Image (cartoon, helix red, strand yellow):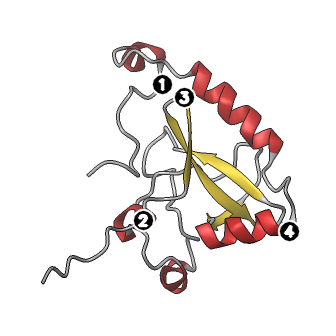
């Protein structure tokens, strides 16, 4: 009899031309927004959970990869400049979809596309161009 534990869910990310953006909720409760990985490093980045309520939120994100949830990878502001609370769970996204079919921020989506297009695809370009090289995002690194 096999009793393997189910695999942890990956973070709720949207991939745009090879770059990952975390789907998040904001303090304004106005749909889903996107957050890019912070290229300045862990000192400036934050985790997918709210910084002061992460212990409480872990229960709400049961089933997700606990390590990926707590790694400081993401920018402090959404692509459109808002402060964000935490990653949007799949359940939260489904609830928003039921409430409003236009629940995704069009500004975040447009800026994510522009940022992904501006990102170099040559792994060596990251050293000279000041952008991240094409390393796997933290949410998929093992």
Which one is nearer the viewer's eye here, 126 or 15?
Answer: 15
Q: In whole angstroms, how far apart are the C-alphas of marks 4 and 2?
A: 25 Å
Few, some or many residues within 10 Å of mark 3 (<14, 14–19, 20+): few
Earlier sequence position, callout 1 versus callout 3: 3
Q: Residue at x 80, y 48 (%)?
A: 105
Q: Residue at x 38, y 27 (%)?
A: 134
Q: In whole angstroms, how far apart are the C-alphas of marks 4 and 1?
A: 38 Å
Secondary element under disc 1, as helix, strand or loop, is loop
Few, some or many residues within 10 Å of mark 1 (<14, 14–19, 20+): some
* Residue 17, numbered circle: 3
Q: Which residue corresponds to mark 2?
A: 9
Secondary element under disc 4, as helix, strand or loop, is helix
- Residue 6 appears in which quarter of the rendering? bottom left
Q: Which residue corresponds to mark 4?
A: 99
In this picture, residue 86 sits left or right of residue 7: right
Q: Which residue corresponds to mark 1?
A: 131
Earlier sequence position, callout 2 versus callout 1: 2
């Amino acid at each position: 009899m096999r009793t393997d534990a189910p695999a942890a869910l990956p973070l709720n990310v949207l991939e745009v031309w090879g770059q990952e953006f975390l789907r998040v909720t904001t303090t304004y409760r106005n749909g889903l927004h996107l957050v890019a990985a912070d290229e300045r490093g862990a000192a400036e980045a934050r985790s997918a959970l709210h910084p002061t309520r992460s212990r409480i939120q872990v229960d709400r994100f049961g089933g997700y990869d606990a390590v990926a949830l707590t790694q400081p990878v993401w920018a402090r502001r959404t692509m459109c400049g808002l402060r964000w609370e935490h990653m949007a769970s799949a359940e939260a996204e489904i609830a928003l979809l039921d409430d409003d079919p236009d629940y995704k921020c069009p500004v975040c989506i447009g800026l994510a596309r522009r940022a992904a297009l501006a990102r170099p695809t040559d792994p060596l370009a990251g050293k000279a161009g000041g952008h991240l090289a094409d390393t796997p995002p933290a949410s998929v690194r093992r």
